[in-house]
Image (cartoon, rainbow, N blue to C red):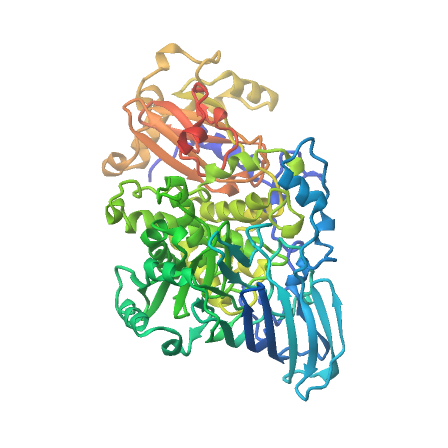
Amino acid sequence: MKAIKFLFISMMLVSFGSFAQDAPKEEKAPEHYNGNKFRQMYQEFSTPNEYRSASGAPGPAYYQQRADYKMDIRLDDANHHIYGYETITYTNKSPDVLEYLWVQLDQNMRAKDSNTPLIEGGRIDPYATAEGFAGAFLKEPFDGGFNIKKVLDKRGNPLKYTINQTMMRVELPEALKSGKDFEFDIEWDYNINDHVDGRGRSGYEQTPDGNRSYVIAQFYPRMAVYNDVEGWQNSQFWGRDEFALPFGSFEVNITVPADHWLDGTGKITNRKDVYSNVEMDRYERAMKSYDKPVIIRTQEEAEKYAAGNSTETKTWKLEAEYVRDFGWTSSRRYIADAMAVKVGDSDVMAVSIYPPEGNPLWEQWSTYAIAQTLESYSRMTFDYPYHKAISVHAKNQGMEYPMICWNYGRPEPDGSYSDRVKYGMISVIIHEVGHNFFPMIVNSDERQWTWMDEGLNTFLQYVAEQDFGESYPGSLKGETNLDKYPSRRGPAAAIVPYMGGDQRYIAPIMTKGLNTYQFGSNAYAKPATGLNILRETIMGRELFDYAFRTYSERWMFKHPTPEDFFRTMEDASAVDLDWFWRGWFYSTQYTDMAIGDVERYYVSNDMNQEMKDLAEARNIPLERFQGLVYMVKEGTGDFKPEMKGKDPKEEAVALKEYLMDNFTPEERAMMKNPKFFYQITVDKPGGLVMPIIIEYTYADGTTEMVKHPAEIWRLNDKQVTLSKGTSKEIVKVVIDPNLETADVDVTNNSWPKEPTVDKFEEMKN
């Protein structure tokens, strides 16, 4: 039998390790204890039920309501006015009996008596332009609210209704039971706003030649959501928080001037009636073109139509199945191109619509950006289910609706444009087209949880932007700078200025969008960055991508909550992320880790003073410690200069005997041969928990990267100590060398301490 000698080095590690790992025994945990950051989120999450399962999937009793629309719309171009008549069929699929219905009147935020301007404070500026002064104090408010003419049941009888700002309650003649539907009509009209003046989400742009380009949305009274979480989602629309809408079908007839070009949500069912023969031929060629857009209406043709002013009209008919909303665009000044994109087994038409002011930028890049979005998002979620995706150019716009969106990005009058304008346009197109997935299909409640569509979409935007740089290199259009896409949001380092900023003006992500500071950083950038950190640093791409796709597939065409997302990401990956959700989404804490100290140890047979003192204090005979291996810290009284650099097997006889007595020559040949021993102290001044990513650089120039999971902080929130034995001397230690954790202060991340370098500025450059 092999003689087994006890190694004191092991005893030290086990003893000290057990003291460190045991949960505090005091009634009150010590200051450094971090268990609460790793507790399960039972307090924050609602209890799972038959509607929403603990796994994050829809429960066996999950339901959602349905709203189907038939509309006749007429655009009065001369007076920029819109008239509509709609029939809504509302189906109650809930187990509840409904006594009334809530309808959204979002245009009422533009009503003359709207309360929207009154929720914002304001100061008198010491100076202002004449235009700004007139807008603030002299200008009459624009009257753009709905004029509700009639609300009728299907027999033509008037229904009682009450309008409360942007919400309208329709009283039912009798309660609507589960499984039943109710049909009613609304007739309405309103003045269309100039969206360039006031940055409206929809409206028209007036052009110098006397024409207008329309991007029209929120243009009809829309049903509010009723669900198992809140009942009626009837929160007012104040202008920032967007929309919560049920799914349904649309049959929409839109009458516009005969020389207008129009497109919108759904299939154009009378295309041959509204397209010329030449346009139809071009469209059919576009359906077979997968690598280059086909111009359907040319710039020359658009300019010819813009010079006229037809008094005749044309009605465009569109139908859409199972969408949550409807948007459309119309102008006589439009150019249009299209290209087919293969998504799974289906062909999807990528369509760009733009006025002459958008060229040459839009003709060169818009449709390719749509195609990349469809490809990247479908890979990360599910195959895009609709037959088309449209990008419309509108000045200062960035807004999304099913199958259609409007985007900014305009070259100079001479056609030139900077990289900033080009990348800005491509990015906004990717973002707004991407909204087809979130929230148009994965239909979260934008009115309550802005980050669930904007944050998730911004994360996927980053993925698509990076794909775009690889798929469409500069040679495509004679340019050379698309190999590395300059994404503005996504990388961890980009969020540092926000997270390390003034805590008085930062709110948790889990805050209603209307009530947050720094809306863009809170609702877009921080959640997107968090997901990127999960994917690249914490979970890894394989686990993250599987879980993210699972969430997307589970909740496509449904109404998820934040908890459904959080639970699914854990359920599909077997990664406990409660600590991450709590820190990143429910708090405003930031990441800051630092190298506290790096100490070198040497192996010795000589009993050090620390152990002598311990033996004396515990009345342990010194002979009990004979034959043990001791670790001596360089620079202490027990350290002997001759220890430095010696082979530990020569220096520590006990270790050599242990190896000889307990292992075969073959086993010894396969064992590590450490000559250097280090103890590294990592401090955590910041509140957020993150993995410790540590890079060791050796004297021979080689490096080693080690990632300690975030759970290393579970019992001590202030400091952890690491030990490392190596055959090579360590000359440098760096935490988070690739800026993966959004560490707000990298000046304390290195040993030896380096001269201050602004790595974030360096990265931006």
Residue 750 left/right relative to 716: left
Residue 251 left/right relative to 293: right
Nearer the observer, 427 or 566: 427
Q: Answer above or below: position of 126 versus 421.
A: above
Quadrant location of the C terminus in the rendered image: top left
Task: Please tell me how many numbered marks the rendered image carries.
Answer: 0
The image position of residue 429, as x and y in percent, is 42, 54
Q: Quadrant of residue 341?
A: bottom left
Q: Answer above or below: position of 668 versus 613.
A: below
Residue occupying image coordinates x 70% and y 66%: 167
Nearer the observer, 46 or 509: 509
Nearer the observer, 753 or 719: 753
Residue 665 left/right relative to 237: left
Q: Answer above or below: position of 98 versus 519.
A: below
The image position of residue 15, as x and y in percent, is 52, 33
The image position of residue 488, as x and y in percent, is 45, 42
Residue occupying image coordinates x 53% and y 53%: 454
Residue occupying image coordinates x 60% and y 64%: 244
Residue 296 left/right relative to 522: left
Determine if residue 468 is in view. Answer: yes
The image position of residue 193, as x and y in percent, is 60, 58
Nearer the observer, 483 or 422: 422
Residue occupying image coordinates x 24% and y 45%: 478
Quadrant location of the N terminus in the rendered image: top left
Determine if residue 506 is in view. Answer: no
Q: Quadrant of residue 181?
A: bottom right
Q: Answer above or below: position of 319 versus 393.
A: below
